[in-house]
Image (spheres, rainbow, N blue to C red):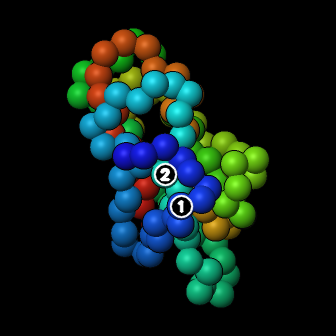
């Protein structure tokens, strides 16, 4: 997947959709994924989001963050959840953000990473 680029329109995630932020890749940390947009058609504007990390080989250490923003600009993204589980994991949380992306903060050791985001 390409790196984050605010000049490229984000991929929309509707309820039931799953997007690949990284798909069996070895990105050099720190690196941000492509961005995903959560449509604003819902009355309460609150979404349950699930994101999952998995690795082809267990790394020695990893720090992966789910970042959110109300406007799709580099400086607006803030980390709202973090995973340091080298075995991979699935996490869920509620957010009112309009845009999401994954940030690989660090990864030490071998192994390709796959990260999905589901709305």
Horizontal side of residue 55 vs 82, given as left or right: left
Give residue 78's position: percent from left, percent from top.
71, 46
At label 2, counting other C-alpha atoms closer than 10 Å, the crowd grade (few under 14, some 14-19, many 20 or more) is many
Compared across the picture, whether 11 is left or right of 58 comes to right
Question: What residue appears at the point 30 percent right and 28 percent down from the top-left corner?
Answer: 112
Q: Secondary structure at mark 1?
A: loop
Mark 1 and mark 2: Cα distance apart in space: 9 Å
Give yes or no for contact between labels 1 and 2 (Cβ–Cβ under 8 Å): yes
- Label 1 neighbourhood size at 10 Å, few (<14), some (14-19), many (20+)? few
Total number of numbered labels?
2
Question: Where in the figure is residue 52, as x and y percent of width and height?
Answer: 39, 45
Residue occupying image coordinates x 51% and y 25%: 29
In this view, which residue lies farthest toward the left? 56
**Foreground residue, 35 or 118?**
35
Image mark for residue 92:
none
Q: Is residue 56 left or right of residue 35?
A: left
Which residue is at a point 43% across and 75% down the rendered structure image? 15
Q: Which residue is mark 1?
A: 8
Say which label, 1 or 2, has the lower sequence index.
1
Image vertical order of residue 16 relative to residue 104, above or below: below
Please name the residue shown 67% across and 81% down the image.
Answer: 44
Residue occupied by mark 2: 34
Residue 38: quarter of image: bottom right
Label 2 element class: loop
Q: Is residue 69 visible?
A: yes
- Residue 116 x %, y %: 38, 50
Position of 101 relative to 84 (above/below)? below
Name the residue nearer the viewer: 19 or 83.
Answer: 19
Mark nearest the camera among 1 and 2 is 1
- Name the quadrant containing residue 89: top left
- Seen as rendered, the residue at the extreme right is 75
User: Picture coordinates of residue 99 (x, y %)?
Assistant: 61, 62
């Amino acid at each position: 997947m390409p790196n984050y680029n605010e000049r490229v329109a984000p991929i929309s995630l509707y309820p039931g959709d799953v997007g690949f932020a990284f798909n069996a890749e070895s990105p050099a940390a720190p690196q941000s994924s492509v961005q995903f947009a959560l449509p604003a058609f819902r009355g309460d504007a609150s979404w349950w989001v699930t994101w999952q990390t998995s690795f082809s080989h267990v790394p020695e250490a990893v720090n992966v963050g789910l970042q959110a923003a109300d406007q799709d600009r580099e400086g607006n993204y803030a980390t709202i959840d973090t995973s340091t589980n080298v075995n991979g994991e699935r996490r869920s949380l509620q957010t009112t953000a309009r845009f999401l992306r994954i940030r690989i903060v660090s990864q030490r050791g071998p192994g390709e990473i796959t990260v999905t985001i589901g709305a």
